[in-house]
Image (cartoon, rainbow, N blue to C red):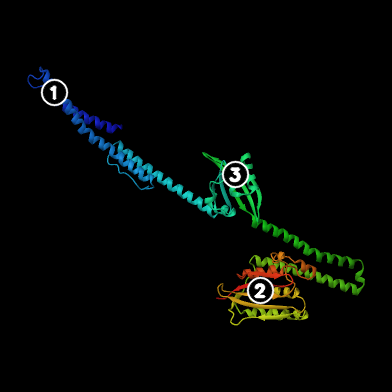
């Protein structure tokens, strides 16, 4: 028992004993009582009964005063266990029980603060995991999934609830990932590898950890599909540039060598070769200018002079400029515009460039006597106008549709027909439309013709 309470009880009992002994002495001091054995027994018995009664009278209040705070403390502990962290007990005394209650309240305040800190940290961790683009899994030492974030759940087409407590192999269902996890388990060191899951290219990092009682493996799945695509595009770009430069440079080299071998002594031959050299230089110049143009557009260095413009003004200029070329090929240019089209927000010069590129391609790939139609229609739901350049030419193979907007890409049919061009026109056109907050796409079938579409936002 605590010292202060023990002293309080001891003093109470001392007072009690003093009272009883004083009564006993008074009783025995009566005349003739000390010599009478019966009187002495009667006095002792009375004193014992009185002592028990008084002890009970003293003990019950002391016990009640001691156990009441314990009962209150038990009740508060149960409320706190149930989540009622604000529950407290007020100390009513300054003895050890009061000090115990005060210490208990301080302990609960400390625990509550630690609990709030843990909740905050867990909330921040959960937020980070939920919004991470990389997939994250944590498994225990035997391979059961203990944590999975939404990115990983989406990657493996599983819900978080269905993934938890299942084995790593059941969740990922891919032999390379399973082999990497086993390798990390055996080697007990970080394992890193590149893995291809269908169309998704992943950088996988598996790290073993052991912190106190916690032991397991952290699996990070970094989606590098876009980066790999960019690397492929860059590689293709370098390859295409090299290929496109090789032809005119080789022609120039042949021309120069021929002239050096004496062809310049023949004026007619020299003029023909020089004209050919000038044509190759024009091709190189056009290629360089279009590359610079594409680079400026992609980097946002080309300022747009946006203004409310009638759709007809965007189509008639390129049509008039290319009409002689279409007439030489006996092609029919048709303009199909509904009445009351809304004005679009556009830079006329840039959109003229887009329409000219698409119209020029349609003329090149449409046989003599074919039809080329320019039309437009309003999409009121999306607040935009869809412009279409449609032809009934040779069309585009299905496997090539996904690449025609790439730089330098030329379809096999275009190459076999020995048609000119750098292969940059569609790439430039698409980027111009995109900086107008529009979209560009194509529908085509071989020998059935092609339809190129692009959108422009209305001026409203």
The Cα–Cα distance between marks 2 and 3, rounded to whole angstroms, is 52 Å
Q: Quadrant of residue 411?
A: bottom right
At label 2, counting other C-alpha atoms closer than 10 Å, the crowd grade (few under 14, some 14-19, many 20 or more) is some
Residue 45 rendering spot, x and y as whole percentages: 16, 24
| Residue 293 in sight from this viewpoint | no
Q: Earlier in the sequence, mark 1 or mark 2?
A: 1
Q: Which mark is residue 132?
A: none
Q: Residue at x 13, y 26 (%)?
A: 23
Q: Which mark is residue 350?
A: 2
Q: Which residue is mark 3?
A: 207
The Cα–Cα distance between marks 1 and 2, rounded to whole angstroms, is 125 Å
Q: Earlier in the sequence, mark 2 or mark 3?
A: 3
Q: Which mark is residue 43?
A: 1
Residue 207 rendering spot, x and y as whole percentages: 60, 44
Question: Mark 2 and mark 1 in contact (Cβ < 8 Å)?
Answer: no
| Residue 319 in sight from this viewpoint | yes
* In this view, the mark in front (2 or 3): 3
Task: Report helix, strand or loop for mark 1.
Answer: helix
Of residues 184 and 96, the one nearer the viewer is 184
Above or below — where is 246 with respect to 162?
below
Q: Residue furthest bottom?
A: 339
Of residues 166 and 195, the one nearer the viewer is 166
Residue 368 rendering spot, x and y as whole percentages: 77, 78
Of residues 131 and 277, the one nearer the viewer is 131
Task: Report helix, strand or loop for mark 3.
Answer: strand
Q: Earlier in the sequence, mark 3 or mark 1?
A: 1
Of residues 81 and 90, the one nearer the viewer is 81
Quadrant into which the C terminus falls:
bottom right
Quadrant into which the N terminus falls:
top left
Instruction: State left or right for residue 250 relative to residue 191.
Output: right
């Amino acid at each position: 028992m605590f010292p202060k309470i023990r002293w309080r009880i001891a003093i109470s009992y001392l007072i009690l004993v003093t009272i009883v002994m004083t009564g006993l002495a008074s009783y025995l001091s009566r005349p003739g009582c000390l010599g009478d054995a019966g009187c002495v027994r009667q006095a002792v018995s009375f004193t014992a009964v009185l002592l028990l009664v008084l002890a009970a009278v003293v003990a019950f209040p002391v016990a009640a005063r001691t156990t009441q705070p314990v009962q209150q403390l038990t009740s508060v502990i149960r409320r706190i266990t149930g989540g009622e962290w604000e529950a407290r007990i007020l100390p009513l005394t300054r003895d050890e029980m009061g000090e115990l209650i005060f210490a208990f309240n301080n302990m609960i305040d400390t625990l509550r603060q630690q609990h709030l800190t843990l909740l905050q940290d867990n909330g921040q961790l959960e937020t980070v995991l939920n919004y991470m683009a990389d997939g994250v899994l944590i498994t225990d030492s035997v391979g059961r999934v203990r944590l999975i974030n939404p990115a990983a759940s989406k990657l493996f087409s599983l819900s978080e609830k269905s993934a938890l407590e299942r084995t790593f192999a059941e969740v990922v269902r891919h032999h390379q990932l399973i082999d990497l996890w086993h390798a990390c388990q055996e080697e007990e060191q970080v394992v890193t590898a590149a893995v291809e899951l269908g169309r998704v290219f992943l950088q996988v990092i598996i790290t073993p950890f052991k912190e106190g009682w916690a032991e397991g493996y952290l699996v990070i799945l970094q989606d590098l599909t876009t980066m790999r695509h960019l690397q492929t595009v860059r590689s293709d770009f370098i390859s295409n540039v090299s290929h496109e430069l090789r032809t005119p440079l080789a022609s120039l080299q042949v021309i120069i060598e021929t002239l050096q071998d004496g062809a310049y002594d023949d004026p007619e031959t020299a003029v023909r070769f020089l004209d050919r050299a000038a044509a190759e230089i024009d091709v190189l110049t056009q290629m360089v200018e279009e590359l610079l143009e594409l680079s400026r557009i992609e980097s946002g260095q080309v300022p747009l002079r946006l203004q409310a413009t009638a759709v007809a003004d965007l189509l008639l200029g390129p049509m008039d400029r290319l009409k002689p070329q279409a007439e030489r090929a006996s092609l029919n240019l048709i303009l199909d515009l509904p009445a009351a089209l809304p004005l679009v927000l556009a830079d006329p010069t840039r959109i003229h460039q887009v329409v000219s590129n698409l119209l020029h391609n349609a003329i090149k790939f449409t046989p003599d006597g074919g039809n080329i139609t320019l039309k437009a229609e309003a999409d009121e739901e999306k607040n935009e106008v869809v412009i279409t350049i449609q032809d009934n030419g040779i069309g585009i193979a299905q496997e090539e549709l996904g690449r025609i907007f790439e730089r330098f890409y030329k379809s096999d049919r275009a190459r076999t027909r020995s048609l000119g061009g750098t292969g940059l026109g569609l790439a430039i056109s698409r980027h111009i439309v995109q900086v107008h907050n529009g979209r560009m796409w194509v529908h085509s079938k071989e020998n059935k013709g092609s339809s190129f579409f692009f959108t422009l936002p209305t001026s409203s």
